[in-house]
Amino acid sequence: MTVKRRVLVVGVVAAFLLATPGWASARPIEGEAHCVVNVIDELETRELVASKPTCFATFADAVSMASGGTISLAESSEGSVMFEDANLIAAMSSFALGIHFDGSGGSGSSITVVGSSCTGGWWNTGSSWSNRISSSYNGCSRLRHYNLPNKGGSFQDTYGAGTTNNLSTLNNMAESVSYH
């Protein structure tokens, strides 16, 4: 294969990947970002190992990706729909351990943690979500938000699978979350 042909093939593949929704994080996103991480392993310590975030410009696109395409929201849907739509709330609890928002009432940017176990595993927010969580959707019965990584420091619980709760004492102070 000639050099020109290789460059053309690489260019076509790159264009395809950038245009494919699963590769949305390869494109810069201005303003709000709605990201999804998948739990891919759990360490002996119970720390959840998550994939790299895949991010979208809309909450609707993030929900579609997180649900494997089974949930389709109107493109203009915002995270606050997690407070309002009982059918969506029930459907989300089948795969989302939690959805964390940087605004109150499910507003602002979000990160969805997709997994299947509500047995106390925990996720470190990493630098991109450190001290940003203001409200969380509970896919599990209880989420425990800690103000330090590795379940350290003080904590605040939010209760009720299928509910979205605002943080009070740890508003914009969580660095790890456990799912029960």
Image: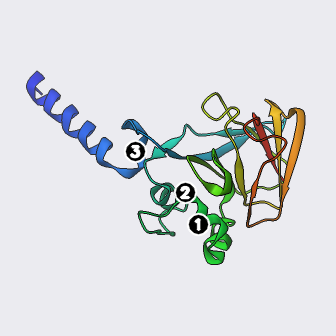
Q: Which residue is at the front of the view, 90 or 70?
A: 90
Say whether residue 146 is left or right of residue 4. Answer: right
Residue 17 is situated, as x and y percent measured from the top left of the image, at 32, 42
Mark 1 vs 3: CB contact within 8 A:
no
Say whether residue 78 is left or right of residue 25. Answer: right
Amino acid type indicated by mark 2: Ala
Q: Which mark is residue 15?
A: none
* Structural distance between the alpha carbons of marks 2 and 3: 13 Å
Mark positioned earlier in the residue sequence (2 or 3): 3
Could you classify mark 3 by the number of other residues whose Cα lies within 10 Å: few (under 14), some (14-19), or many (20 or more)? many
Q: Which residue is at the front of the view, 75 or 176?
A: 75
* Residue carrying label 2: 66
* Disc 1 element: helix
Residue 33 is situated, as x and y percent measured from the top left of the image, at 49, 44
Mark positioned earlier in the residue sequence (1 or 2): 2
Q: Establish if 2 lies above or below 38.
A: above
Say whether residue 118 is left or right of residue 112. Answer: right
* Structural distance between the alpha carbons of marks 1 and 2: 16 Å
* Structural distance between the alpha carbons of marks 1 and 3: 22 Å
* Residue carrying label 1: 81
Quadrant housing the N terminus? top left
Q: Which mark is residue 24?
A: 3
- Is residue 36 among the parts visible in the rendering? no
Amino acid type indicated by mark 3: Ala
Residue shown at 44%/41% (left/top)?
31
Amino acid type indicated by mark 1: Val
Residue 96 is situated, as x and y percent measured from the top left of the image, at 66, 58
